[in-house]
Amino acid sequence: MRIVRVVCPRDCYDTCFLISVVEDTGKIRSIKGDHGNPVTQGFVCPRGVKDCERVYNNRVLYPYIRVGSKEEGKLKRVKWSEALDLVADKLRKVLRVYGPRAVLHLEYAGNMGLLTWYFPQRLWNAIGATKTDYSICSKSGHDAISLHYGLSYGIKPEELLEMKLIVYWGFNAAVSSPHMWALSIKARKKGSVIAVVDPRESESAKGADIWLNPKPGSDVALAFGVARYIIEHGYVDLDFIEKWTYGYELFKEEVVKWTPSRVEEVTGVKWSLVEELGEAYGELKPSATMIGIGFQKSVHGAESVRAVALIPALLGLHRGFYYSNSRGYQVDIAYLTGESLSNKKPMTISQVSLSNHVKRGDFKFIYIYNMNPALTLPNQKAFREGLLRSDVFVVVHETHWTETTGYADVVLPAPTYLEKDDVVIPYSHHYIRISRRAINPLGESKNEIWVMKELAKRLDLKEKWVYEDPWKAIENALKNALENGSFKELLMGKVLKLKYRPISDYQTPTGKIEFYSKRAEELGLNPIPRQYPLKLCGEEFILLNSSTPKYTHTQFREIYGSIPPITLINPEDAKVLNIRSGETVELYNELGRVRVRVIVSSSVPRRVLWSPRQMIGLNGEPQNSLVPCITQKIGGGPIFNSTTVKISKVV
Ligand SMILES: Nc1nc2c(c(=O)[nH]1)N[C@H]1C(S)=C(S)[C@@H](COP(=O)(O)OP(=O)(O)OC[C@H]3O[C@@H](n4cnc5c(=O)[nH]c(N)nc54)[C@H](O)[C@@H]3O)O[C@H]1N2
Ligand SMILES: Nc1nc2c(c(=O)[nH]1)N[C@H]1C(S)=C(S)[C@@H](COP(=O)(O)OP(=O)(O)OC[C@H]3O[C@@H](n4cnc5c(=O)[nH]c(N)nc54)[C@H](O)[C@@H]3O)O[C@H]1N2
Ligand code: SF4
Ligand SMILES: [Mo]
């Protein structure tokens, strides 16, 4: 039996240090938590622990190419050389006839490893292929906070232990960040108070001391209500305001317009609860305002993030929020991807509205890896129609069989993180450690860099940096990024810390926290966050959807089965519609129809439904066939939590 130290590379707040226990036969027996990381604390979530099974389940093990029509979806196993020759041949032809803009590489954070996600992009940057703007997840919130703070980094997870108040705002950490949640529970044992702001009674809301449930999308009004209370009760740190901020008086003018009755009317939250949260903020210091990524995925989600992020500044806290700390580190990602090495200027396209472009046939060659877009992107109908076009060639490099591999002309087998060495950069804590290969790659799976180099050779690419030794590239990318230790020590398995930008540096035009954002003004955006009217007409419901404990997006269905096709509805609404728990309904709008089983539950408010995200309906339609390709004004993010649907009973 051997023990191999690995790091979970999934798109997750926690980036756990783990131990894989490998039998002498070369089989992984179990995955355990590793105590080497103070934030991830040696325990594993229901997903990480099952990676020892998922690694052997539903795997793509060999290269395949399509035979027959796309609709038939038949594949035949081939040799690597045949698959690569075919891919290179198609790519060459598309480049010759249409140019690099007609080539799209589509990936996201399925595995956040530097060698899995970033380095392989050198091929595409050398060609000048079209890329996406990575707007599907957190971008709007980053851009929102940047308007007031410069970069969006905030408190470090371990600081939670020192907090007297921890506010999870649109952040269901009990499910989406079990380790930061565990730190918060530890803090509570020492007397800290946990507050949750969420329209529904989420797992986190159930575990909180204070719960406020505003109507979806009414958080600017709520944040302003809280700010008003803080201002009116003398809790504002005026010395801090003077020294570190800009535009407070203008902000205050806006905030005081939010009278208790106006806040109650817009948010649906009783003023006494707003007072309770305001009082907690005023009295309990220091506090952490934890802003969810899920929170910003609505039409005006970025505005909400802006308003909430400004609360800690009133209290005299430097960056007293957490959203994602990825921009607090100085890892040279542009070097890794080759973006800063290439003299080509690739076109960047919206990831959120990509389906429309794919449907229109803007791309003739699409290379997909590290993502399952045929389930996770908005407007699935358009996306899938686009992939089925006869003039589009689709290559998918995957560890597992997915909906997306079902649309591929070529499927290439990839090893999972347990089968390759890598380094993962977290987006919450700042600890890094090399993740070592626990077992040899299964079947004929080949890693992303190998595939990239094989294609580069076939295309006869001359750029030397495409063939750079990947570990040399990591060393270069980390040159200014480490707080302690050296690259050599990293290779030896030591735990290192990433250097963090100073907490009181503000990269704004004034160099201060800007309550009134000068950059927003320049860009033609509201300098002060604004509450937009909530629109919900006639029989419409808002369909909230968020993460569940057993799945990372569409992963782990191999272990836990399908993501349940269910929707939660408030008892009053169920009564009006004459629907009972267990019955089947169709959620529909102009884009699609998705059948689900109903669960009547008072955990959701009226006119709000909740479903696990990325489920597939009983009629085979994915949830995201209901989601439009609308992009947010700030940052171009998605609007999953503004999806509106009507309900019809299926009899
Ligand atoms: N188990 C698990 N964990 C994950 C993931 C996973 O797939 N599974 N994915 C990871 C990724 S990529 C991401 S982006 C994060 C997301 O993690 P979170 O940021 O926690 O996002 P969600 O899970 O969507 O939960 C957001 C919460 O916000 C609430 N909400 C929705 N609209 C509003 C609103 O208008 N106002 C307020 N106040 N609240 C609102 C929802 O009801 C929900 O409870 O999770 C990461 N962690
Ligand atoms: N309805 C709805 N849809 C959403 C959201 C929502 O809230 N609601 N949230 C959005 C958000 S925040 C996000 S982040 C996206 C996530 O969207 P995706 O990134 O598409 O989500 P996953 O299902 O995790 O897909 C990752 C894929 O990468 C593969 N993979 C894992 N490791 C490796 C590897 O080492 N190599 C290769 N080649 N492949 C690997 C996995 O097998 C998996 O198929 O979904 C978005 N979609
Ligand atoms: S999915 Fe997240 S919480 Fe689970 S093991 Fe991986 S990093 Fe940790
Ligand atoms: Mo995400």
Image (cartoon, helix red, strand yellow):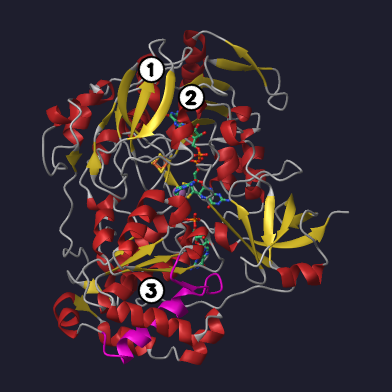
- Disc 2 to disc 1: CB gap under 8 Å: yes
In this view, the residue farthest toward the right is 651
- Alpha carbon distance from label 3 to label 1: 48 Å
Residue corresponding to mark 1 = 439
Q: Is residue 631 visible?
A: no
CA neighbours of label 3 inside 10 A, class few (<14), some (14 to 19), many (20+): many
Q: Is residue 552 above or below residue 610?
A: above
Label 1 CB-ligand 2 distance < 8 A: no
Quadrant for the N terminus, please.
Answer: top left
Q: Residue at x 63, y 13 (%)?
A: 76
Whole-percent x, y for residue 398 in the image = 50, 26
- Decide which of 86, 46 is in the foreground and name it: 46
State the SS at label 2: loop
Asked where in the image residue 193 lies, by quadrant, the reply is bottom left
Q: Amino acid at mark 2?
A: Val
| Stretch of the chain drawn in magenta | 208-235
Q: Which mark is residue 307?
A: 3
User: From the viewer's perspective, is 411 left or right of 282?
Assistant: right
Q: Which mark is residue 55?
A: 2
